[in-house]
Amino acid sequence: MGAVKRGVAGLSRKEKAQATRRRILDSALAAFTERGYSDTTVEAVARDAGVAVQTVYFTFRTKGDLLQATYEHVVLGPDALHPHQTEWWRTVERTDDVAVAVRALVEGTVELLERAAPLVWAVLGDSTARAAYEHNERLRRDGNDHLVRVLAEKHPLRPGLAPSAARDILLVLTGPQLYSQLTRELHWSRSAVADWMTAAVLRELFAVDAL
């Protein structure tokens, strides 16, 4: 006899709490993306998630904390993995070929951006969400600092390019703003964006032509 899927009644207390948390985060993501941060209320998120307002506040304390948790929710993805725990990050670190490393970096980043860029795009101009945006950009800068060092060990940066400038270029070329503009406004496909980003990173950081 095949395995029988457990219903909600068969879940443990921890599993129920995790399911409720995910439901709230999914509702918050939809609300922030569609309405923006300022125009989203905790009451609306609770209603869309089918929970009491008190449950949202008990789980996340404040609307700002809910936004940060939503950022982390989309960045970590369905497997709840930090970027440095993913297979694409390991490929970047392990391969000796800078072109292979950049392609892996871009493919992994584009997959992440597909989830996260709409949220960033929605809250980018909202001054009340600025603290969360800047916090997450600092995390992204730290990650890109590390990635530039790893890549530069495989192939020297192009002459005259300082590591800090290489990091900044990488931040822009693989960032949510550019991804959103190319996909949302200019209707590029995900694969077209990945190809262009790979070529641009190789050219601008290493003066290498993509294959």
Image (cartoon, rainbow, N blue to C red):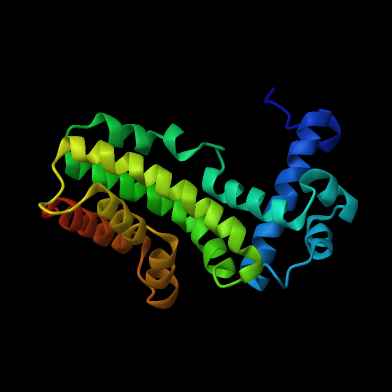
107 or 128, which lies in front? 128
Tell me which corner region of the image, top left, top right, bottom left or bottom right, holds residue 97: top left
Label tally? 0
Q: Is residue 132 above or below residue 181?
A: above
Q: Is residue 6 left or right of residue 118?
A: right
Residue 32 drawn at (x, y percent): 66, 65
Taking 127 as reference, is 179 left or right? left
Q: Residue at x 22, y 32 (%)?
A: 95
Image coords of residue 116 (percent x, y): 52, 56
Which of 151 and 81 lies nearest the eye of the viewer? 151
**Residue pictured at 43% horizontal, 35% vertical:** 84
User: Which of these two is toward me, 160 or 49?
Assistant: 160
Q: Is residue 211 visible?
A: no
Image quadrant containing the N terminus: top right
Instruction: Name which residue lies at 49% across and 61% down.
Output: 117
Residue 113 position in % (x across, y down): 45, 56
Compared with 110, 4 (above or below) is above
Q: Is residue 55 or residue 8 the one in the foreground?
A: 55
The picture quadrant where one finds residue 99 is top left
- Residue 83 in view of the camera: yes
